Image (cartoon, rainbow, N blue to C red):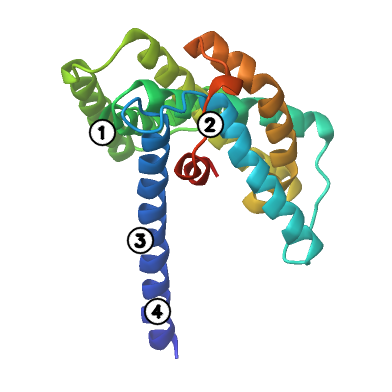
Amino acid sequence: METEKKPASAVSDIGAWAMNVVSSVGLIMANKQLMSPSGYAFVFATTLTGFHFSMTALIGMVSNATGYSTKKHVPLWELLWFSVVANTSITGMNLSLMLNSVGFYQISKLSMIPVVCVMEWILHGKHYSSKVKIAVIVVVVGVGVCTVTDVKVNAQGFLCACVAVLSTSLQQISIGSLQKKYSIGSFELLSQTAPIQALSLLLLGPFIDYYISGKLLASYKFSSPAIYSAI
């Protein structure tokens, strides 16, 4: 019986990994096409993040209403703190994708591995084995080489990438802490923070985007493909 379960479990894991890879790559390419000057030139990355979290909040509300997920109590101040970190994370990632090449964007995401390790060591006193340290050093060297040799890196894009990496690393650590503290799943936590994130980003997003791009959201001419990509 156990031998029958193992192959089924392996197939399920492979399917989940494959879906994760396909969806992640598809999302990155769709966002790049939407924000790229050669694509739909939607240079409002912060507002775009607000659109995404609006859809996430809607899905969370439907999930809670249908009983698919349950709402667990998390103090409002902790939800607000997490929302600020998460907003900075995803906005920084979208800005990094908009301002940098896809290759540099992906390389910068790899640098989160050593950053998370350092943050966990500082915040929680976590220690790692020699094998893990060697693996992290290899990642750091690889990221450094790719960063130096990427001729498309610019100062603004590099700064956004740094902010994205630091905030995303802190977000990953915060997720684990909140899940352990309140025995809450990642989807349940997201369904509670998504409305806060959506509201704050939709209110502040147009102003932040104007400061970065010098363009007004109201002046953008939406097309059907651009709307589909944004949603």
Q: Amino acid at mark 2?
A: Ile
Q: CA distance from mark 3 to mark 4?
A: 18 Å
Q: Amino acid at mark 3?
A: Ala
Q: Quadrant of residue 151?
A: top left
Is any part of residue 185 visible from this angle?
Answer: no
The mark nearer the N terminus, 4 or 1, is: 4
**Looking at the image, is 192 positioned above or below residue 4?**
above
List x then y, in percent, for residue 146: 20, 24
Q: Which residue is mark 2?
A: 90
Which mark, by number, is residue 18? 3
What is the secondary structure assignment of the residue under circle 4? helix
Q: CA distance from mark 1 to mark 3?
A: 28 Å
Identify the residue at horizontal 42%, vertical 29% (top origin).
35
Q: Which residue is mark 4?
A: 6
The mark nearer the N terminus, 4 or 2, is: 4
Quarter in which the N terminus is drawn: bottom left
Tell me the crowding category of disc 3: few under 14, some 14 to 19, or many 20 or more residues within 10 angstroms, Cα based: few
Q: Which residue is mark 1?
A: 134
